Image (cartoon, rainbow, N blue to C red):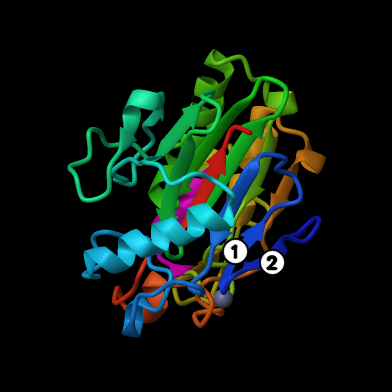
Amino acid sequence: MEFSKPFAEISYKGIVYMTAPTIPFKHCFTTRWGGVSEEHLASLNLGENRGDKEENVRENYRRILEALGLPEQNLCFTRQVHKNEVRIVKDEDRRELYTPFAYEADGIVSNVEGLPLICFTADCIPVLLCDPDAKVAGAIHCGWRSTVSDILYAAVEKMTELGAAASNIRAAIGPGIDMCCYETDAEIPQAIEKLLDGDSEGTFFAVGDTGKYMVDLKETNRKRLLQIGLKSENISVSDECTCCNCDKYWSHRQTKGERGSQAAIIVVS
Ligand SMILES: [Zn+2]
């Protein structure tokens, strides 16, 4: 697994977030640090469904928007369901916190300037995409199910509808669970093999004869983006494993689900 250029760690009034060298738009991958939530949700929990106090979640959103230099505003959310639906969103798709979700999708793309697109993870892989010339962006939630059902192909297709070109799309594969911690049954490597049509070198290996595998979802998604037509130099990959760095990131696996949510946010800018 090659990690390309490193991500940068940015601090602003206690908030710490990561940015990717390949993404020229305003964006972030949040960490646990800099919010007001407590105990296992400490502290920058952005998930409304994690049992947190509403006032804390609202304050956490206020803080991350301020850190990004964005006005206080509603963001574009989607209910993530581990499938491959990608939706083109517009201003009217903004959702107020603590209101019902209007739709389900694991990816959202847009060409509306200033509209923050957000996706949530806690081990799954967040992928941010943008075409700086066509002014199109995307936030894609790539857990294993979405990954092997080819959500990135669907995302690039929707971006193309908005004028983007695969060869000009920049991608950032954010912090998520790495091969060091992601042990699975045979089902996942088999699905990766199928997704990548055999070009799966470096995406998984067998753990002796246990029937278990160690899987690299970041590398799987990187390889798929190359197949779709992105240029290698336009893809950056975070070298941080959420499960190994559970003081900095929430890991679903490490916490057995007792966790907050971090987010990846991108804005056409
Ligand atoms: Zn790890």
Q: Nearer the viewer, residue 243 or 264?
A: 264
In the rendered image, the quadrant that contains the C terminus is top right
The picture quadrant for ligand 1 comes to bottom right
Q: Position of residue 137 (x, y in %)?
A: 57, 32
Please name the residue that numbered disc 1 is placed on.
Answer: 17
Q: Is residue 183 above or below residue 21?
A: below
Q: In terms of image quadrants, where is residue 224?
A: top right
- Marks 1 and 2, how far apart at CA: 6 Å
**Local crowd size for mark 2, using a 10 Å CA cut-off: few (<14), some (14–19), many (≥20):** some
First in sequence, mark 1 or 2: give its number: 2
In the rendered image, the quadrant that contains the N terminus is bottom right
Q: Quick check: 160 left or right of 131? A: left
Please name the residue that numbered disc 2 is placed on.
Answer: 9
Residue visible at 56% across and 79% down? 245
Q: In terms of image quadrants, where is residue 29?
A: bottom right
Residue 89 visible within the image: no
User: At label 1, which amino acid type do we have?
Assistant: Tyr
Instruction: Please give the label number shown on residue 152.
Output: none
Q: Helix, strand, or loop for circle 1?
A: strand
Q: Are marks 1 and 2 in contact (CB under 8 Å)?
A: yes
Q: Helix, strand, or loop for circle 2?
A: strand
Q: Is residue 244 above or below residue 230?
A: below
Residue 3 visible within the image: yes
Residue visible at 25% across and 33% down? 103
**Local crowd size for mark 1, using a 10 Å CA cut-off: few (<14), some (14–19), many (≥20):** many
Q: Quick check: 251 left or right of 193? A: left
Residue visible at 30% across and 38% down? 95
Majority secondary structure in the magenta region: helix
Confirm whether the magenta stretch covers residue 264: no
| Span colored in magenta | 183-193
Outermost residue, left side:
100
